[in-house]
Amino acid sequence: MTVSIKKVEEIEKMRIAGRLAVDVLDMITPYVQVGVTTNKLDQLCHDYIVNRQDAIPSPLNYKGFPKSICTSINHQVCHGIPGNKVLKKGDILNIDITVKKNGYHGDTSRMFFIDTPSIRAKRLVEVAYQCLWIGIRQVKPGRYLSEVGKAIQQYAMSHKCSVVRDYCGHGIGSEFHEEPQVLHYYTPDAKDVLLQSGMTFTIEPMINLGKPEVKLLPDQWTVVTKDHTLSAQWEHTILVTDDGVDILTLSPGEHQIDTTG
Ligand code: MF3
Ligand code: CO
Ligand code: CO
């Protein structure tokens, strides 16, 4: 397994792609409301990426994916296809944006509450957010990638949540999905990766209120929890630096290293 080390020029392009992906999430936020369809959110993001950013929505036609963004509601874990479904009060929604600009990808996702969430939905979304940040905090050159999954799993389990095992984070660059696989749990069976400055990958834990098992819907994309319990996910694209980590999809409201967890 080879994990590419990005050159300075590549990192600059990835910074741009990361910032564009964040800008799409910020643009769409005021539209994420009761009564809107996920198709409408997809159309707004598509038009913004193509017309305003002069960029490419990476999901569109990726392995046959039919839309420009992923929208995963409630018990949907990831890769939800935007459609005619109308968002209703109490829903939780993940919007996952990947943008390609100058040949490089930036990938980030956030959770949204549709009006007021239930207490347990809010708790799940907060646990998933902390899982992302605890994972990010493990990243430093000279440390092992397995520390990321180990820390995430420990935090999730101590909060009575489970970690999805069938999908993982990934290296990213000129390809949407590159090596390595970034597991959000620990297994001695995975080949470990010694982190080095210049590696770029995503951390994107999918955290369930119930059991970790998932199934694929007949549309061949949408992943849902087998027990139909709620699932939440947050994602950042990160760069390993000489002394730690740089988050390429940080939003202005977020701190580079969040210490609240
Ligand atoms: N953005 C997703 C990820 O974080 C991948 C979506 S693939 C798609 O890796 F085809 F469903 F868009
Ligand atoms: Co990703
Ligand atoms: Co993504």
Image (spheres, rainbow, N blue to C red):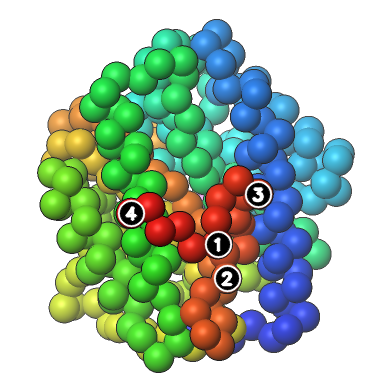
Label 4 and label 1: CA atoms lie apart by: 14 Å
Compared to residue 42, the image places residue 221 above or below, namely below
Say what amino acid the circle numbered 1 marks: Gln
Q: Quadrant of the C terminus?
A: bottom left
Say what amino acid the circle numbered 4 marks: Gly
Marks 2 and 1, the one that precedes in the sequence? 2
Q: Secondary structure at mark 3?
A: loop
Q: Where does residue 83 sit, x and y in percent of width and height? A: 54, 22
In this image, 190 relative to 204: left or right? Answer: left
Q: Secondary structure at mark 4?
A: loop
Q: Where does residue 165 sit, x and y in percent of width and height? A: 24, 56
Q: Where does residue 173 sit, x and y in percent of width and height? A: 62, 70
Q: Secondary structure at mark 2?
A: strand
Marks 4 and 3, the one that precedes in the sequence? 3
Marks 2 and 4, the one that precedes in the sequence? 2
For label 3, the crowd category at 10 Å Cα-Cα, with few meaning under 14, some 14 to 19 and many 20 or more, is few
Q: Nearer the viewer, mark 3 or mark 2?
A: 3
- Residue at the spot of label 4: 261
Say what amino acid the circle numbered 2 marks: Asp
**Residue 252: image tag:** 3
Q: Is residue 240 visible?
A: yes
Compared to residue 186, the image places residue 79 above or below, namely above
Using the image as rendered, state which of residue 259 and residue 67 is in the foreground. Answer: 259
Q: Secondary structure at mark 1?
A: loop
- Residue at the spot of label 2: 246
Q: Residue furthest front?
A: 260
Q: Are marks 2 and 1 in contact (CB under 8 Å)?
A: yes
Q: Is mark 1 within 8 Å of ligand 2?
A: no
Q: Is mark 2 within 8 Å of ligand 2?
A: no
Using the image as rendered, state which of residue 142 and residue 233 is in the foreground. Answer: 142
Label 3 and label 2: CA atoms lie apart by: 14 Å
Please give the name of the residue rendered at 57% of the width and 71% of the height, measured from the top-left corner: 246
